[in-house]
Amino acid sequence: MIIVVKKNCEEKQLDNLIKWVKSQGLGVDVSRGDHSIVLGLIGDTPKVDIDLVRSMDIVENVKRIQEPFKSANRKFHPDDTIVDVGGHKFGGENFQIIAGPCSVESEKQIIEVAKAVKASGANLLRGGAFKPRTSPYAFQGLKAGGLELLKLAKKETGMPIVTEIMSVAHIDLFEDVDMVQIGARNMQNFELLKAVGKLNKPVLLKRGLANTIEEWLMSAEYIMSEGNRQVVLCERGIRTFEPMTRNTLDLSAIPLLKEKTHLPVIVDPSHASGLSRLVKPLSLAAVGAGADGLMIEVHNDPANALCDGAQSLRPEQFDEVVKATDVMLPLVNKKRV
Ligand code: PEP
Ligand code: MN
């Protein structure tokens, strides 16, 4: 971290600032130029409250030169992390597809969809049992019963299951879930992040509705700092001023994340757009941008879905998306495995 001190500061103020920096357990390198004084902070600078420093009277400018995330940082872990979910690998050259309905609705629905998406090439089955809905009057999911139906679908098809956890209180119910999803609305539920960080289980961490890439990586850091390094990031669109789509898919996040972190990054084009007809073009764009996989909502009867029917593909539409992505994968040196 670098602090630029105001030109006409008093020596006493500068001394006080240097003392304060040292009291934070950091070293300081002072360089005096003709026009300004620059302090270079040495040590564990991610701990420093940058806003507090910025608010000090004698501070002209302050800049981090080291990112505040460590475990997730590619600088300290240059190789791609490979996250294995029930034998299916995320990261490196692997391309994975997670598919299934927004919500688990019935045994017939989840098993029918699971069989269909597996036949098309999805390796992992998604389905919400605990649903984060904007309205308390909307379908809230089948909860523990939904988890049981997912397990049944896994037994029928052999597909590992991915489903969202909404509360620390439910953690024991998720024992047989292969990959726990932290939804957009909980990306900064730090107690939940710490709790899944204590599990020995892969975590799918979705980007918050209005969160920066750095905030997202800090959330990954919360999980990893508790010991769980099996984190896959999922870009699902962010809130912008554009009302024609549910969210705006931030495609630049993918190559940027690939620079900044070693964690796998997948894309959810369903929640990003809210429109089933945009799922195919956005899936192809995600492949082109270097994503490690996709998570796509598929329903056997979208018109009557209890949640997110407008963005859900019918199985035959999903099949088309998989075929189209397969054509593109060699261009980005990835393989669907
Ligand atoms: C979901 O994947 O079911 C979901 C609720 O998505 P998000 O958290 O991205 O809105
Ligand atoms: Mn949904």
Image (cartoon, rainbow, N blue to C red):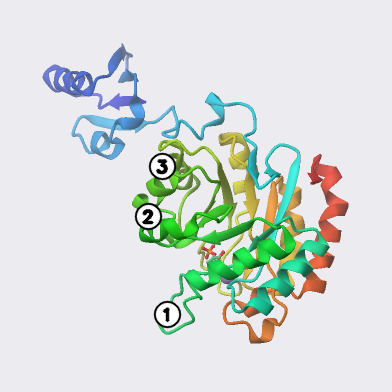
Q: Which residue shows up at 60% across the image and 55% down it? A: 250
The mark that comes first in sequence, 2 or 3, is 2
Q: Secondary structure at mark 2?
A: loop
Where does label 2 land, which residue?
189
Mark 2 crowd level (few <14, some 14–19, many ≥20, 10 Å Cα): some
- The alpha-carbon separation of the residues under discs 2 and 1 comes to 19 Å
Q: Does label 1 or label 3 sit earlier along the sequence?
A: 1
Q: Position of residue 72 (x, y in %)?
A: 51, 35
Examine the rendered structure and indicate whether residue 72 appears above or below residue 277.
Answer: above
**Local crowd at mark 1 within 10 Å, few (<14), some, or many (≥20)?**
few
**Mark sitting earlier along the chain (2/1):** 1
Q: How many marks?
A: 3
Task: For residue 327, say whether it is visible.
Answer: yes
Q: In percent of the image, x 63 and y 60: which residue is there?
A: 268
Image mark for residue 135 = 1
Residue 296 in sight here: no
SS state under label 3? helix
Q: In screen coordinates, is 153 left or right of 129?
A: right
Measure how far apart labels 2 and 3 are at the Cα level: 10 Å
Task: Mark 1 and ligand 1: say if the CB distance to the nearest ligand atom is below 8 Å.
Answer: no
Task: Give amino acid for label 2.
Answer: Asn
Tell me which image quadrant ligand 1 sits in: bottom right
The residue positioned 82% from the left and 73% from the top of the image is 316
Residue 222, numbered label: 3
Q: Residue at x 71, y 37 (%)?
A: 92
